[in-house]
Image (cartoon, grey):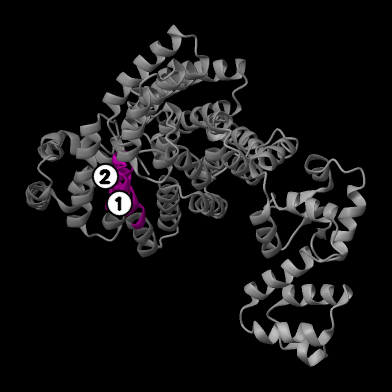
């Protein structure tokens, strides 16, 4: 075969390699060229034809064929140890080298693999597929390390699936599910559970994980349904039921139904105490602390969060410890202890980077950015927010994306880029409305209102601030800063104009929000005259624990 003839088939490298191997077997170049011509533009069909000739050629030994067939069980590249699992032939290493010489198996550094067409050709002819898949599982399990390798686990799952080891398959999903979610491999986990259900296998813990995945993706109503299905599942074990019940409460909390969520956290805590499930006790106690924080009871919130942290440290729940540190940092931030908060956030980040918990890594980066922004380091804050946004986008965390966009907007507003800030706030609001994050919606509306105030567009400012305040009141959340901005508008435009704006905006509020706001309270002269009187270095009257100039006096 001439150089020109070979180059004409540059798109068929495997076929060319196989043809050369046939030449080594004694086939004439003329016969090889004829085969190429007869199968022109059908490289896969040609490769199969050539493979068949090589595989059945008298110079291909039975031992070579057996090792090659067994090796076809692996989709991914593997190390040399694998041959001890798929062959008992004492001469297998010599056989391996012969197969490598014949282009049947290729070495990639310390790993071995075969061309997909070679693998497909051989796998189709493999007789004891189930037995070989079991051997592949046994080998791959030896490769596991303490830190989850999602790609390795996907391969193990593939072999379990094809060896019909269904019980072990279910156990693997149950055991590794949380780590898959923390690593951002939600698609892989969902595919595993979907395949299990296709085979008629359903478990309560599957719906717990489905709920976690839906929560990350911003499908919060679906998450609620999954968690409810998990804790009501026939035969559900008490631990899974308790955790699903607590997570149902967490979704209510995220949706802004704070009072209702507290019932689930308190009852969930009691359920966990009955079975001495410390992980659940710690989680529900932590969540009770978050409710207290939202209600403005910062000292009580801190007590609950520290109580949760102590339990998590006792049971060495690293992801839980990290979550507690983040939440404690948040309360310290609200109390004005920025250095204390930053210390907790960095400690949390160190833990979650070690265990590879991407959702919490993103939260930690965001929180560090918040402290830097408060300290006036807008450049450092912006860097952290963008790092958070990148991870959130990578794992499909819609709430994380919305939070990052909102906070980037805050930095732009501080830089007086009002149009840029407004754009980010609106992008964030759109996502929060999509996922039903009532707390986040209220915050975004507040931020949008402040930008319109800076633009002196008082109509749009008060429209957004009224809606934000009504949502806060509906949720039972204490947010004095929204009221203070409304008072600012009243002072800025005067009582008469404000009253006209107030009537117009109130009439346009959604009917379900009107009962939750008394717009007339902002017309009281007493409040208007006293709202801006506090000493800027005195504690803020809203109860946050911060100085007035760092809180409502911004």
Q: Position of residue 132 (x, y in %)?
A: 70, 42
**Could you classify mark 1 by the number of other residues whose Cα lies within 10 Å: few (under 14), some (14-19), or many (20 or more)?**
many
Tell me, yes or no, if residue 360 can be seen here. no
**Could you classify mark 2 by the number of other residues whose Cα lies within 10 Å: few (under 14), some (14-19), or many (20 or more)?**
many
Single out the residue that lies furthest toward the front: 58
Q: Quadrant of the N terminus?
A: bottom right
Image point (34%, 59%), residue name: 422
Query: On screen, 41 above or below 139?
Result: below
Q: Position of residue 340 (x, y in %)?
A: 57, 30
In the picture of the structure, the residue carrying the numbered disc 1 is 450
Q: Are marks 1 and 2 in contact (CB under 8 Å)?
A: yes
**What secondary structure is found at the residue carrying circle 2?**
helix
The earlier-in-sequence mark between 1 and 2 is 1
In the picture of the structure, the residue carrying the numbered disc 2 is 485
Q: Position of residue 456 (x, y in %)?
A: 24, 59
- Numbered circles on residues, count: 2
Q: What segment is highlighted magenta in the picture?
A: 427-449
Q: Nearer the viewer, residue 81 or 539?
A: 81
User: Would residue 321 be counted in the magenta stretch?
Assistant: no
Instruction: Name the disc covering residue 79, or none.
Output: none
Majority secondary structure in the magenta region: helix
Query: On screen, 429 above or below 15?
Result: above
Q: Quadrant of the C terminus?
A: top left
From the viewer's perspective, tell me whether residue 404 is left or right of residue 23: left
Image point (68%, 36%), residue name: 147
Q: Calculate the distance from the C-alpha at mark 1 to the C-alpha at mark 2.
A: 7 Å
């Amino acid at each position: 075969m001439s150089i020109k003839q070979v180059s004409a088939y540059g798109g068929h490298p495997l076929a060319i390699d196989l043809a050369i191997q046939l030449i080594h077997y004694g086939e004439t170049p003329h016969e090889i060229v004829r085969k190429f011509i007869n199968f022109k533009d059908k490289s896969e069909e040609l490769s199969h034809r050539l493979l068949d000739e090589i595989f059945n050629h008298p110079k291909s030994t039975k031992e070579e064929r057996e090792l090659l067939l067994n090796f076809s069980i692996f989709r991914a590249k593997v190390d040399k140890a694998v041959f001890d699992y798929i062959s008992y032939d004492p001469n297998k290493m010599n056989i391996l080298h012969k197969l490598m010489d014949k282009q049947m198996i290729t070495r990639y550094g310390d790993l071995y693999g075969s061309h997909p067409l070679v693998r497909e050709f051989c796998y189709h002819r493999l007789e004891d597929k189930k037995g070989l898949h079991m051997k592949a599982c046994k080998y791959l399990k030896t490769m596991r390390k303490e830190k989850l390798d999602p790609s390795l686990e996907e391969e193990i799952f593939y072999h379990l699936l094809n060896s019909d080891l269904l019980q072990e398959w279910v156990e693997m999903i149950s055991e590794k599910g949380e780590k898959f979610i923390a690593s951002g491999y939600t698609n892989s986990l969902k595919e595993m559970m979907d395949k299990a259900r296709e085979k008629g296998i359903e478990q309560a813990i599957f719906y717990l994980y489905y709920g976690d995945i839906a929560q990350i993706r911003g499908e919060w109503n679906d998450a609620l349904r999954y968690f409810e299905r998990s804790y009501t599942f026939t035969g559900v074990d008490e631990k899974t039921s308790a955790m699903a019940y607590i997570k149902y409460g967490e979704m209510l909390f995220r949706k802004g139904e704070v009072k209702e969520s507290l019932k689930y956290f308190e009852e969930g805590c009691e359920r966990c105490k009955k079975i001495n499930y410390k992980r659940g006790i710690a989680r529900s106690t932590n969540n009770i602390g978050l409710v207290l924080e939202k209600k403005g009871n910062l000292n009580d919130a801190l007590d609950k969060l520290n109580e949760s942290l102590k339990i998590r440290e006792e049971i060495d729940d690293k992801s839980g410890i990290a979550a507690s540190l983040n939440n404690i940092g948040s309360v310290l931030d609200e109390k004005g202890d920025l250095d204390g908060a930053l210390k907790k956030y960095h400690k949390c980040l160190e833990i979650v980077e070690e265990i590879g918990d991407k959702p919490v890594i993103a939260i930690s980066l965001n929180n560090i950015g918040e402290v830097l922004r408060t300290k006036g380091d807008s450049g450092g804050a912006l860097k952290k927010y963008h790092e958070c946004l990148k991870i959130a986008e990578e794992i499909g965390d819609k709430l994380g994306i919305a939070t990052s966009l909102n906070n980037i907007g805050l930095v732009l507003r501080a830089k007086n880029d009002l149009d840029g800030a407004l754009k980010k706030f609106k992008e964030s609001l759109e996502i929060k409305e999509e996922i039903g994050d009532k707390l986040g919606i209220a915050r975004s509306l507040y931020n949008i209102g402040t930008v319109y105030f800076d633009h002196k567009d008082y109509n749009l400012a008060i429209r957004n601030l009224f809606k934000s305040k009504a949502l806060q009141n509906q949720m039972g959340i204490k947010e004095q800063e929204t009221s203070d901005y409304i008072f600012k508008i009243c002072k800025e435009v005067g009582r008469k104009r404000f009253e006209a704006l107030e009537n117009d905006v109130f009439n346009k509020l959604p009917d379900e929000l009107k009962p939750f706001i008394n717009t007339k309270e902002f017309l009281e002269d007493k409040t208007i005259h006293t709202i801006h009187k506090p000493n800027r270095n005195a504690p803020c009257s809203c109860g946050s624990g911060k100085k007035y100039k760092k809180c409502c006096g911004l």
